[in-house]
Image (tube, helix red, strand yellow):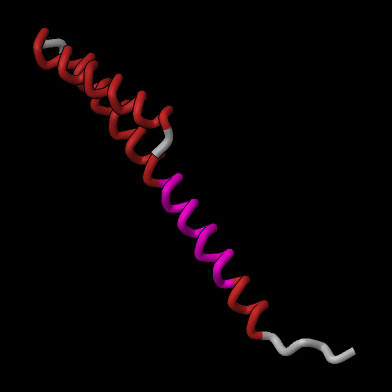
Amino acid sequence: MTMKHRIQQAVGSAREKAGEVTGNRRLETSGRAQRRSAQLRSTAADVGRRARRVARSAQVRLRGSRPVDPR
């Protein structure tokens, strides 16, 4: 999770709570949407990082198991 995602989640949570306290449903809803959007983006970034890591390790394993050309 990047710092940007953490900040967006915190801001969204604050807006959501402010909306709850003041009774402003629009503010509450927009805060919830902002928080969830940041969570989704963070998860997508984590999945991408893990996929790249798996692909790199698979490449290393494949390259390491090939027979060396005797030339």
Dominant secondary structure of the residues highlighted in magenta in the image: helix
Q: Is residue 22 left or right of residue 56?
A: left
**Image spot of residue 67 (x, y percent):** 72, 89
Which part of the image, by quadrant, shows the N terminus?
Answer: top left
Which part of the image, by quadrant, shows the C terminus?
Answer: bottom right
**Residue located at (22% from left, 18% from top):** 14
**Residue located at (29% from left, 34% from top):** 36
Is 47 placed above or below 63 here? above
**Image spot of residue 16 (x, y percent):** 20, 20
Q: Is residue 14 left or right of residue 65?
A: left
Query: What count of labels does the image hold?
Result: 0
Q: Which residue is more in the foreground, 29 or 16?
A: 16
- Quarter-of-image position of residue 19: top left
Q: Which residue is more in the foreground, 20 or 64?
A: 64
**Image spot of residue 22 (x, y percent):** 11, 8
**Image spot of residue 40 (x, y percent):** 35, 41
Is 49 placed above or below 11 here? below
What residue span does the magenta drawing correspond to?
44-58
- Quarter-of-image position of residue 30: top left
Q: Is residue 49 magenta?
A: yes
**Residue located at (46% from left, 57% from top):** 50
Q: Is residue 71 left or right of residue 63?
A: right
